[in-house]
Amino acid sequence: MTPIRILLVDDQPLFREGLRTLLSVHPDFEVVGEAANGLEAIRLVRLHLPSVVLMDLQMPVLDGVAATRRLHEEQPDCRVIVLTTFDDDEMVFDGLRAGAVGYLLKDAPSEKLAEAIRVAARGETFLQPSVAAKVVAEFARLTKKVVPPTSLVDPLSERELEILRLIAQGASNREIAGTLFLAEGTVKNHVTNILGKLEVRDRTQAALKAKESSLI
């Protein structure tokens, strides 16, 4: 099995060292490099082509938001997971707008971090359940454009609405499958249909648009 290539980006050497140690116990993970700021992260992504980047937000030279935005434009296949200390930091939401596919607090359990990396590597979005509701609420507050439910050309089915509600709560495809007693592949197909109908690129945007449109 090809390991998931990971780049660590944080301006605190001790935190990066601890993170590398945590990830080393997983045989399907390979840390390919470390960066202390966003500019260095961009250079190392070009050099090592990691699958997942664990990105701090507040760093010198180039912060995590700007680095995420540039990586999203230059390397769209590289998945950025934001790691932050505060769940009410506005920079977190800026990071998600910049193209990050995950949001995780630095004090999250190590198994949640491993899950987030695997979910991101599969092309999905991960929001830590304990903060998912805050993320959606903050996006709704900061975004002024409201899309009415009637704007959907192809309305969501009842099953798709069930899945959308769970997405907004931060559930992964596997968790949704377990909750609704569905095959994980079936859930993945529904999620693809939901993103298409809502005309969004990822699960975070789907949750935001659903909130604004009063779909959930």
Image (cartoon, rainbow, N blue to C red):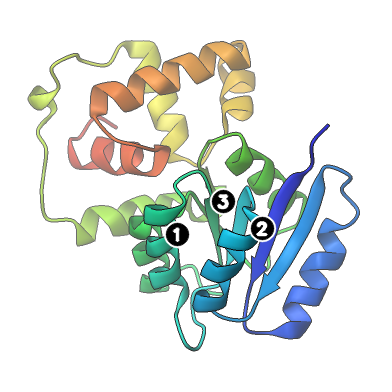
Disc 3 and disc 1: Cα gap in Å?
Answer: 22 Å
Which quadrant is home to the C terminus? top left
Kind of residue sitting beneath label 3: Gln
Disc 3 and disc 2: Cα gap in Å?
Answer: 27 Å
Q: Are marks 3 and 2 in contact (CB under 8 Å)?
A: no
**Callout 1 secondary element:** helix
Q: Are marks 2 and 1 in contact (CB under 8 Å)?
A: no
Disc 2 and disc 1: Cα gap in Å?
Answer: 13 Å
Which residue in the protein does label 1 denote?
Answer: 71
**Mark 3 surroundings within 10 Å by alpha-carbon count, few (fewer than 14), some (14 through 19), many (20 or more):** many
User: Visible in this render: residue 100?
Assistant: yes
| Image position, residue 34 (x, y; %) | 70, 71
Can you say whether 120 is above or below 11 in the image? Answer: above
**Callout 3 secondary element:** loop
Instruction: Tell which circle, 3 or 2, labels the residue nearer the N-terminal end.
Output: 2
Mark toward the viewer: 3 or 2: 2
| Residue at x 52% of width, y 17% of height | 187
Kind of residue sitting beneath label 1: Leu
Which residue in the protein does label 2 denote?
Answer: 48
Kind of residue sitting beneath label 2: His
**Callout 2 secondary element:** helix
Which residue in the protein does label 3 denote?
Answer: 128
Hey, which quadrant is residue 161 in on the image?
top left
